[in-house]
Image: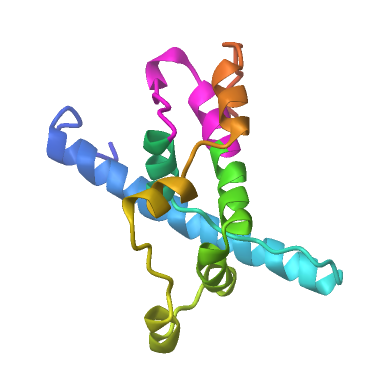
Amino acid sequence: MLEERDINRFSVQKDFINRNLVDTRYATRELMNLLRSYFRVNDLDVKVKSINGGFTSFLRKKWEFKKERNKGYKHHAEDALIIANADFIFKEWKKLDKVNKVMENQIVDEKQAENMPEIETEHEYKEIFITPHQIQNIKDFKDYKYSHRVDKKT
């Protein structure tokens, strides 16, 4: 037996989830590096950015999406579309242009951090994260069955 602890205990489940989150972050970073290398070697002008789950969750709440895991796999498709629309935010709003450039480099030095734009009013904040019309299209998308194929290794 690989796991001798009681898997029904909250602390054991929390440890399991934390390990999976670390694995996911590592896999994301490796995939991002692989894609960047591929595009660079093939002289393709493609920028690869990683959007973390916290930002996706922030947009999900801001745009009033309910994450209903118990209703199937639709929330994964929604998350992918939300992430795709996040790029729209960075391109559309000049104040976030510096943030976008930092995200493309994935490195923030002290000088860059000092020059980050300030959002000064509540109105300015709301204006940046106002719901793009594409989000309503995602919400209106019907509930379809999504397949989650499990590979069985022999």
Viewer-proximal residue among 2 and 71: 71
Count of picture labels: 0
Q: Residue furthest bottom?
A: 111
| Residue 43: percent from left, percent from top | 86, 72
**Residue 10 visible within the image:** yes
Residue in front for this viewpoint, 121 or 19:
121
Residue plotted at (67% across, 64% down): 34
Residue stretch rendered in magenta on the structure: 63-81
Image quarter in which the C terminus is found: top right
Relative to residue 85, is residue 64 drawn left or right? left
Q: Which of these two is toward me, 81 or 145?
A: 81
Q: Position of residue 63 (x, y in %)?
A: 44, 33
Q: Position of residue 101 (x, y in %)?
A: 58, 72
| Residue drawn at point x = 50 percent, y = 68 percent | 99
Q: Is residue 149 visible?
A: no
60 in relation to 106, above or below: above
> Does residue 66 show up magenta in the picture?
yes
Q: Splitting the image into 4 quarters, where does residue 78 fall?
A: top right
Quarter containing the N terminus: top left
Vertical placement of residue 117 versus 52, above or below: below
81 left or right of 61 in image: right
Q: Residue at x 38, y 49 (%)?
A: 123
